[in-house]
Image (spheres, helix red, strand yellow):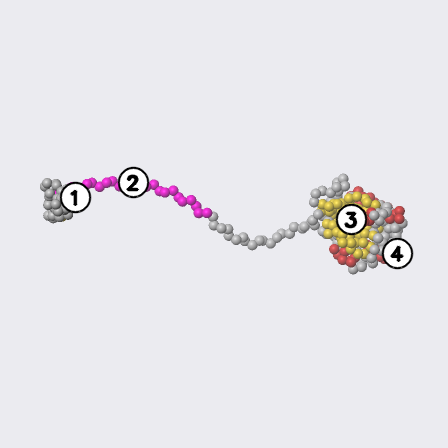
Amino acid sequence: MLPLSFPKSFSRAMLLAFCAVATPALATTVVEFYNTTFDNYFITADANEAAAIDGGSAGPGWIRTGDTFNSGGSTPVCRFYSSQSPSHFYTIDASECEGLKQQQATTPATQERWNFEGIAFVSTPPAGGSCPAGTAPVYRVYNNGSSRGVGSNHRITSSLAARLEVVARGWSYEGVVMCAPVAAAAVLQPGAVGATGATGPAGPAGATGATGATGATGATGATGAAGPLNPNIITDAVKGNTALGISSLTANTTGAANTGSGKSALAGC
């Protein structure tokens, strides 16, 4: 990395206090801070560290910018701190991380170098400067500290507006350096057993069964013998009626109509 300059207004005690903050733990939200004194940016995924900075343990001038992005992925992000200024550097590039570690091992602590602090969080590396679906680009911008005679600092942000703002102030855009998940990674926990659902409505009635076969017709009984003729039954052949006892019918032997009296030739009807 580019050499760092130690600001005269920054004391060694402040540097040690800032770097003594607990090593960041893996978290879901990466929070950005800005130091109004040194014009430096810093990010952390450790909520306890963020709270400590809010409380002033890292020295005066640190405020939250309001910019955040989500951690999550399978690749660790290395975090380094400057030996000469209140500045941190982050990289997801394994070769860049290893190169800075080697530089630290061969450079005296009194000289400008980046000291490895640990894994800040996890993320996803870009491919050809592009991020996969479901992630957002995270940009890195450099303040050109070595050429300006100030401590080197990088702004790591997913905000395009923030990137453009510091570029307008003379910072150099270094590209997309990691890809943040659009939604915070969730830790799956076993859920409680749900309540038994309500009984569903009764199903439709089954089809009516087939009608049984009709039983065989019984045999016809034998015809009884004819009884003797009742002599008291006389058939009225003319009217088709049957009279019991002696008939009141008097036959009209002539069969002619009785036109004189207007009565029927059949008397007694």
- Residue 168 on image: x %, y %: 83, 48
Tell me if residue 235 can be seen: no
Can see residue 216?
yes
Q: Quadrant of residue 16?
A: bottom right
Mark 2 or mark 4, which is nearer the start of the sequence? 4
Residue identified by numbered label 4: 9
> Between marks 4 and 2, how big is the CA–CA gap?
120 Å
Query: Which region shows up in magenta?
Result: 204-230
State the mark number for residue 161.
3
Q: Earlier in the sequence, mark 4 or mark 1?
A: 4
Q: Is residue 211 left or right of residue 262?
A: right
* Within-10-Å neighbours for mark 4: few <14, some 14–19, many 20+: few
Dot 3 and dot 2 residues touching (CB under 8 Å): no
Q: Is residue 37 magenta?
A: no
Of marks 2 and 1, the one in the foreground: 1
Measure the C-alpha gap from mark 1 to mark 3: 123 Å
For marks 1 and 3, the one nearer the N-term is: 3
Residue with the mark numbered 2: 216
On whether residue 226 falls in the magenta region, the answer is yes
The quarter of the image holding the N terminus is top right
Q: Is residue 213 left or right of residue 81?
A: left
Q: In the rendered image, which residue does mark 1 sit on?
A: 239
Inter-mark Cα distance, 4 to 1: 148 Å
Q: Nearer the viewer, mark 3 or mark 2?
A: 3
Q: Secondary structure at mark 3?
A: helix
Amino acid at dot 3: Ala
The alpha-carbon separation of the residues under discs 4 and 3 comes to 30 Å
In the image, 136 versus 120, the foreground residue is: 136
* Comes first in the chain, label 3 or label 2: 3
Q: Amino acid at mark 2?
A: Ala
